[in-house]
Image (tube, grey):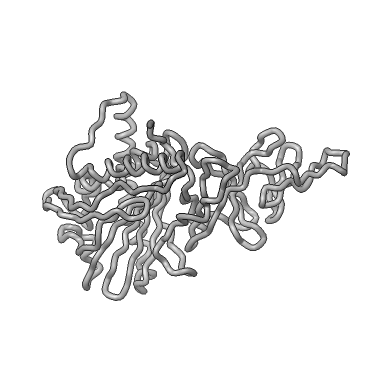
């Protein structure tokens, strides 16, 4: 079986909710599909295929008054469920315009972030209510937005870069993080969980300065889930930090990376600006090396995954294969990852 680049019947991060204002439309390409997002009169997000069914003009190029989308070409009108409510040029007032539909994607706002379900078959959306992402944050609490960048790589290369432990020392050399001159042998325990795997809770490494500024007793658990969600949950005494990186394929050549952040630590609101700048610097270090990766991949070199530092990447590919099989055969997904202790030097 050939591994699919894009996984379907899963939820993808679309945007931080602050980017979606009432009365405004936001157009995005996700998994190569054109989607237009908006908020209805109750401030609930919706997502429609971004094409008027008449002549294919993007609906996002038209007008939206908070209730009705109107195409800029012939003025066809649609409500936020995608149902046609009016065709100005049509003289036959007996024609039932409600028979004309724009596909509506399942869309959810979770802790101030907007997610979209990308189905394999647009007539079968029953699975949309399953596997809605658990962001580990209480209902009513919202994530802060850190940064959004476009990675010049497909989803597979982007995910492998996200979960690869060996690059951290060299790409993210910083006074506040770690140095390539202070390498240490790491031993981390992993377990399968849901659609991925987790690095079980542990005390952060002593050569990672970023954790040390938190003070007190500290522990962290890192979780990766298909299609491309990395969650780090840090416990600091009675407080917690949830840091999430989400990868959403734009098309076969680009992947959007979004980073969001939540904490119960009160003083963070007073130092949020410098903390966000550090987070953005960290992400742009990855973006810089991905620009170099993009150049190298143009010559289509033979690539390899080697040893325990690359085992998470091999797990990712096997997880994708098993998800594809389960969706094609309509059988339960079986997580192929086995509990294992991995070793690497960083």
Q: Is 241 rendered above or below residue 35?
A: below
Residue 23 position in % (x across, y down): 65, 55
Residue 162 position in % (x across, y down): 31, 47
Q: Is 207 rendered above or below residue 266?
A: above
Tell me what residue is drawn at x 25 percent, y 59 percent: 200
Q: Is residue 15 left or right of residue 264?
A: right
Tell me what residue is drawn at x 45 percent, y 55 percent: 131
Tell me what residue is drawn at x 41 percent, y 51 percent: 258
Quarter of the view holding residue 321: top left
Q: Is residue 68 left or right of residue 38?
A: right
Residue 62 position in % (x across, y down): 68, 43
Residue 117 position in % (x across, y down): 51, 49
Q: Is 137 rendered above or below residue 64?
A: below
Tell me what residue is drawn at x 34 percent, y 43 percent: 287
Of residues 96 and 71, the one drawn nearer to the viewer in this rendering: 96
Residue 4 makes an appearance in the image: yes
Residue 281 makes an appearance in the image: no
- Find the residue positioned furthest to the top: 299
């Amino acid at each position: 079986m050939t591994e699919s680049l894009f996984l379907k019947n899963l939820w993808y991060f679309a945007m931080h909710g602050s980017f979606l204002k009432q009365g405004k439309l936001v157009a995005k390409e996700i998994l190569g599909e054109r989607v237009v997002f908006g908020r209805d009169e109750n401030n609930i997000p919706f997502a429609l295929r971004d094409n008027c069914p008449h002549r294919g003009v993007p609906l996002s190029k038209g007008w939206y008054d908070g209730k009705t989308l109107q195409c800029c070409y012939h003025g066809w009108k649609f409500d936020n469920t995608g149902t046609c409510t009016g065709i100005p040029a049509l003289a036959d007032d007996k024609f039932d315009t409600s028979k004309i539909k724009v596909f509506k994607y399942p869309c959810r706002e979770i802790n101030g972030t907007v997610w979209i379900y990308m189905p394999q078959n647009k007539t079968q959306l029953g699975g949309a209510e399953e596997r809605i992402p658990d962001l580990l944050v209480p209902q009513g609490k919202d994530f802060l937005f850190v940064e959004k960048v476009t990675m010049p790589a497909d989803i597979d290369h982007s995910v492998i870069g996200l979960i690869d432990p060996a690059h951290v020392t060299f790409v993210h050399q910083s006074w506040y993080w770690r140095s390539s001159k202070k390498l240490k042998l790491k031993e981390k325990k992993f377990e399968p969980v849901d659609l991925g795997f987790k690095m079980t809770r542990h005390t952060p490494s002593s050569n990672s300065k970023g954790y040390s500024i938190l003070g007190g007793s500290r522990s962290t658990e890192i979780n990766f889930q298909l299609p491309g969600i990395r969650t780090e949950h840090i416990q600091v005494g009675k407080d917690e930090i949830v840091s999430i990186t989400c990868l959403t394929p734009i098309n076969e050549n680009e992947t959007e990376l979004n980073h969001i952040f939540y904490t119960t630590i009160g003083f963070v609101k007073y130092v949020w600006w410098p903390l966000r700048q550090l987070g953005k610097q960290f992400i742009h270090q990855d973006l810089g090396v991905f620009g170099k990766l993009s150049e190298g991949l143009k010559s289509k070199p033979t690539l390899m995954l080697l040893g325990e530092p690359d085992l998470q990447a091999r797990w990712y590919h096997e997880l994708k294969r098993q998800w594809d099989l389960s969706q094609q055969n309509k059988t339960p997904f079986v997580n192929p990852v086995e509990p294992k202790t991995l070793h690497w030097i960083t």
